[in-house]
Image (cartoon, rainbow, N blue to C red):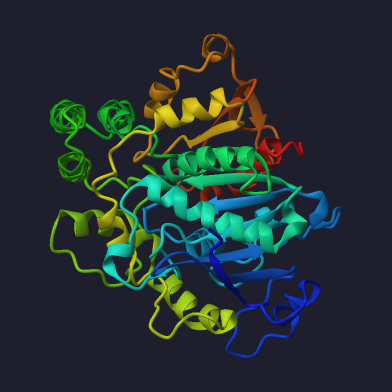
Amino acid sequence: MMGRIKTSSSRVLLPLLVLLVLLPAAASSPVQAAGQEAWGFVDVRDGAHMFWWLYYADSPSASYQQLPLVMWLQGGPGGSGSGFGNFEEIGPLDRDQLPRKTSWVQTASVLFVDNPVGTGFSYVDKPDAYARDVATVASDMLVLLRSFFTQRKEFQNLPFYIFSESYGGKMAAAIAMELTKAVAHGSVKCNFAGVALGDSWIAPVDSVMTWGPYLYSTSLLDDFGLAEVTGAAEAVKQAVEQGQFQKATELWSVAESVIEQNTNGVNFYNILTKEPDEEVSSLAVDDFLSLLARRHVRPLHRQSLVQLMNGPIRDKLGLIPPNVTWGGQAEEVFSSMAGDFMRPVVDVVDQLLAAGVNVTVYNGQLDLIVDTMGQELWVNRLGWAGLPTYKNMRWTPLEDPASPGSTGAFYKTYKNFSFYWILKAGHMIPSDQGTMALQMLKMVTQQA
């Protein structure tokens, strides 16, 4: 079924659809990005409306028809790609509306989707319309992608990649699998070229079980702290093994609290930096789910970003319903997914590899919440036929483009699987190491 699509350009011919964003900005509007843009909503289910925002590639050496299309999926769940991913990580402008030198738009068209429904500017009309598992998330995204590629046929033959971060990676794996099937059946017309899983929540228990050893090895836990964190992690593992996934999510919250108490409040997203002092938008904290939302959704909704998105950006977009606030349903999104949160999707990655899909894993050296040790554990358990050869390969160093002569990353690739270890980066790799992330993007999309 085709989702009903509403866009900022629904009354004009396609070549003219972005003229409105090329006009001089009013005094109260943000600085305009240099390239073409488009945005809109797709009704993916009854009462469920998903927002997307497209930046056409803006390269001095190639037209957008010569460059790939990349869809970016944020984590949380409840984090907004149109907000955080766009203005804090890879979009053409930063949060202060200044040009970003490491924007991915210079080498690809970038599609931000506020996913699942209720995230960012996406919204639901009724509580039972929130997604509760990745299967629903994938189904919703297929409706959006079918609408997008039908409406914008100029992108159907361009290489299309899904890049993701954090919980977005778990959703990306499921979406990639469903998209592969849809392309094969002819129900979605696109040139799906691969999926990239960044610091992704693919095997939650592997992350939790390696928190203690990782923190201990970096002198952030003593022997007593290691014992306490290990005990808390074992409780999470036991709940997962018993199929008690809601309980596992609760115990995951407990394990995080044990870490905070033993490390003097380590930053889960970059162990060498302090949590920003900026206040975040108000979300009630009255139970463990609200506590988790405070830890893992609130950092994506800092007050200055909230003000930007609900002020100048909202005015620019011109189609956000009056009753919809950017990020206003974020906590509900997180809570609705709590029963599915700790479920692994390693089997989905195996299915992707078996189907011949190009899969990339990339991880930040300084990330705790999805530490590299945990990522390597699930990768080494894959049933993929190429794994024995991959494991026997040595990695290759990559020079940091921002610091010639310095190593910025290592990578290893075999057939349709690649792994990038990004140095000096935490959970949000493009924010911490923008030039290295851009170089990785070019390599994954076969531009370098």
In this figure, what is the number of numbered marks? 0
Q: Residue at x 74, y 69 (%)?
A: 36
Q: Is residue 374 above or below residue 16?
A: above
Q: Given the current orientation, which residue lies at the most extreme bottom position?
A: 27
Q: Is residue 223 above or below residue 161?
A: above
In the image, taking residue 245 as reference, residue 30 lies left or right, namely: right
Q: Is residue 67 visible?
A: yes
Q: Residue at x 37, y 53 (%)?
A: 76
Task: Give how far across and how far down residue 344 sits, in percent.
Answer: 34, 33
Task: Give how far across and how far down residue 378 sits, in percent.
Answer: 40, 24
Q: Residue at x 20, y 55 (%)?
A: 289
Quadrant assignment, res 213: top left
Q: Quadrant of the C terminus?
A: top right
Task: Give how far across and how far down residue 66 sits, in percent.
Answer: 82, 50
In the image, taking residue 415 as reference, residue 322 lies left or right, namely: left
Q: Given the current orientation, which residue lies at the most extreme right position?
A: 61
Q: Is residue 331 visible?
A: no
In the image, taking residue 320 as reference, residue 233 lies left or right, namely: left
In the image, taking residue 248 as reference, residue 374 lies left or right, namely: right
In the depicted view, which residue is nearer to us: 332 or 4?
4
Q: Is residue 364 above or below residue 95?
A: above
Task: Give how far across and how far down residue 172 sits, in percent.
Answer: 49, 44
In the depicted view, which residue is nearer to us: 211 or 326?
326
Q: Is residue 95 above or below residue 137?
A: below
Quadrant assignment, res 26: bottom right
In the depicted view, which residue is nearer to us: 248 or 370?
248
